[in-house]
Image (cartoon, rainbow, N blue to C red):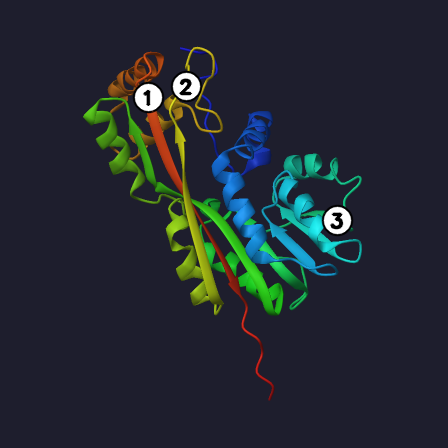
Amino acid sequence: MPSKDAHGLGYTQVDDEANVAFLVATMETTAEWDTIRELRGWERSHLALRPGERLIDVGCGLGDVTLALAEDLGPTGEAVGIDASEAMLAVARGRVAGAACPVRFSTGDAVALDEPDDSFDAARSERTLQWLVDPAAAVGEMARVLRPGGRLALIDTDWSTLTIDVGDADVAAAVDAAVRDERNRASNVGRRLGDLVRAAGFLDVADARTTHRWTTWDPDEEPAPPGCFSMRSLADDLVEAGQLDRSGADTFVATIHDAARSGRFSMALTMFAVVATAPVAVPR
């Protein structure tokens, strides 16, 4: 078993984690997924940012999307990235040089944005709501800071769609049962994005989804499938969920690792996206 196999993957309190460097590296890896690129391209097309507009990116992470979208805002626009992690923001700030418009990266709380009402033309949030206890509050905050007619884009994962196929029905069943329920965070928020924005009063909701698949992985060379958690971390989660007992965790991990070594490993996860429009105020 690789020495790093015990690592997990979580972004609830990044700066408190012992493996911050790993989390940063994982963000870099997932940005290269075809799935992420496809959803970001769809988002960019539907947001249709214009020169001179202001954008807020809530949960901006390493700032790569904030800076990419800054190109659409031009020199008279402005982009603001908000994240709870100073470690992530340190990387983002190191990339600001040469940005196409003024860009500001600030520490902040997704459910209590330190920004004025009606101050942005567009807002986005990617894979952030799943780490929150109350994603509706974060959507409400983005609605608050958007101007009437502003656009909101959300991209997020639905972990209830996670499937693992290693030719073992018990492994598949344990994973399926464990990911159905949300525990302490909105891990399955992806499929609810449309409902969340409609409940917040948004209109003209467009949606998209795509599935990321892992079909090859060498557990002797990589501690986890690229951009994902380790199977040891998954086993621990299944124990916590009551789908495995502690004595069965080693067998669970070994079964998946053996399948991966022999080319029988397959895993899939679906992500969702929406773009919607804030209502225009009716003159009194």
Specify the quadrant of the image occupied by residue 240.
Answer: top left
Find out whether the residues at labels 1 and 2 contact each other: C-beta distance under 8 Å.
Answer: yes
Label 2: element kind: loop
Query: Where residue 52 appears, x then y in whole percent?
Result: 75, 61
Q: Disc count in the image?
A: 3
* Picture layout, residue 168 above or below residue 51: above
Q: Quadrant of the N terminus?
A: top left
Q: Amino acid at mark 1?
A: Phe
Please identify, in this view, whether the residue under mark 3 or under mark 2 is nearer the observer. 2
Q: Amino acid at mark 3?
A: Val
As measured in the structure, the alpha-carbon distance from the residue carrying label 1 to the one carrying label 2 is 7 Å
Query: Where residue 135 appears, x then y in whole percent?
Result: 46, 54
* Residue plotted at (30% across, 16% down): 259
Reading the image, the residue beneath label 2 is 217
Reading the image, the residue beneath label 1 is 265
Instruction: Identify which residue, 218 or 91, lies in the foreground.
Output: 218
Specify the quadrant of the image occupied by residue 98.
Answer: top right
* Picture layout, residue 62 above or below residue 121: above
Reading the image, the residue beneath label 3 is 103
Is 52 displayed left or right of 194 in the figure? right
> Dot 2: few (<14), some (14–19), or many (≥20) neighbours within 10 Å?
many
* Residue plotted at (69% across, 59% down): 50
Q: Earlier in the sequence, mark 1 or mark 2?
A: 2
